[in-house]
Amino acid sequence: MIETKRWNLTSHAPSSGQEPADQAVLDASHMLQSGKTVAFPTETVYGLGADATNESAVQRIFTAKGRPADNPLIAHVATKDQLQNLVEELTPLADCLIEAFAPGPITFVLRSNGVCASNVTAGLSTVGIRMPAHPVAQRLLSTCDIPLAAPSANTSGKPSPTRADHVWADLYGRIDGLIDGGKTGVGLESTVVDCTGEIPVILRPGAITQDQIKAAWGSVMTDPALVATTSQPKAPGMKYTHYAPEVPLILASGTADFLQKQITAEQAQGKRVGLLATDHTAKDIHADRIYTLGDELPVVAQRLYDGLRLFKKSDVDVIFCETFPEEGIGLAIMNRLKKAADDNMNGFS
Ligand code: TXA
Ligand code: MG
């Protein structure tokens, strides 16, 4: 059991002088520089950071999360210069997407020059690199001045953390520190884009959409494995069961009436049913426990993981969740939901 230090930076307004907030970032930086693990907020989800150039520090991440060793980590940097230090070549494609979208919720896959430890890249010749926009992440990265390997700060297989309490629930006693920066903004993990070729290939959908990337570069492709389960995904992490709530999740398309019928049928068998749905849909439905997701897709994205984590075995036996249009960030929402449901889709009406 490791002693986990927790800092509160929920009001992270840029401050001047040696205020407590600065002291927290300094303390966390010292820990990271000495090979320890610290979880920190980004605008997507919380990350669990360690020195990306230090193999044994990176190993602590895999151990804390219980993460399979063949799943590579994303290296986080504060600046484009730091990004260039980690790659063989900044391709024109990567340069274009960095200008358009960084810092932000996007990860660039490029050829590694070997500066990152080999367990960061899980032995691949490429490395995923991200420049987060969150002010706490920015300050931490520029203060410690090392690239930080940081996967989502959850136990492997669970939904990613969008609040410090999610990290605490999963990793307390297994990591050295946690910076509480309040709720994350986007709520889903970054868009991962392979930038090694002529055309950007989306390996994992996220808040930076296919249309936005196409508008910036002129063309875009998606990894065929994102739509067909027959091919091997290029982002190794996409092949694992992910985002799994404690109880089974069923995705249900159709009208509120249709959804209510399915819920009532489960209840008739003695099951307690949880519902994840938009405010609009939820207002007409009776379930044993309801978590509402707002009505706009960006709000659904923000709230989704908190909702998936809310339902416990002690409260419900099954969760129903409505489906969303697969456009814009809806593509990322449905990608995560299908994995969380293990492709458990109920009839379309
Ligand atoms: O928003 C995010 O990306 C968050 C925050 C903390 O930055 N991080 C995150 O990391 O989601 P993680 O480890 O949970 O997911 C990283 C994904 C995995 O699917 C992994 O397989 C893929 O990125 N990935 C990393 N390096 C790669 C590489 N060189 N080639 C292909 N896929 C890679
Ligand atoms: Mg993850």
Image (tube, rainbow, N blue to C red):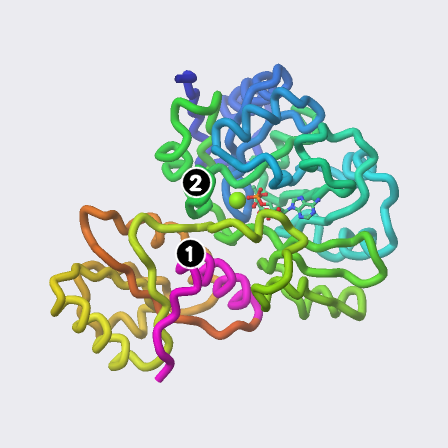
| Amino acid type assigned to the residue bearing label 1 in the image | Ala
Q: Which residues are magenta?
A: 328-349
Decide if residue 347 is on the left or right side of residue 135.
left
| Residue at far front of view | 230
Q: Quadrant of ligand 1?
A: top right
Tell whether position 169 is magenta: no
Answer above or below: position of 263 versus 60: below
Crowdedness near tag 2: few (<14), some (14–19) or many (≥20) residues, C-alpha within 10 Å:
some
Which residue lies under the disc numbered 1? 340
Residue furthest out toward the bottom: 349
Residue shown at 54%/18% (left/top)?
27
Residue 149 percent coordinates (x, y): 63, 33
Q: Which residue is mark 2?
A: 182
Quadrant (top left, top right, bottom left, bottom right) of the N terminus = top left
Side of 145 relative to 337 (left or right): right
Residue at 67 percent of width and 49 percent of height: 107
**In terms of depth relative to the viewer, which is nearer, 218 or 136?**
218
Q: Residue 78: x percent and y percent?
A: 70, 36
Judged from the image, the secondary structure of the residue bearing numbered disc 2 is loop
**Location of residue 86 in the rendering, given as x and y in whole percent from the top left corner:** 79, 35
Relative placement, left or right, of 65 versus 143 is left
The amino acid on which the numbered mark 2 sits, given as a three-letter code, is Gly
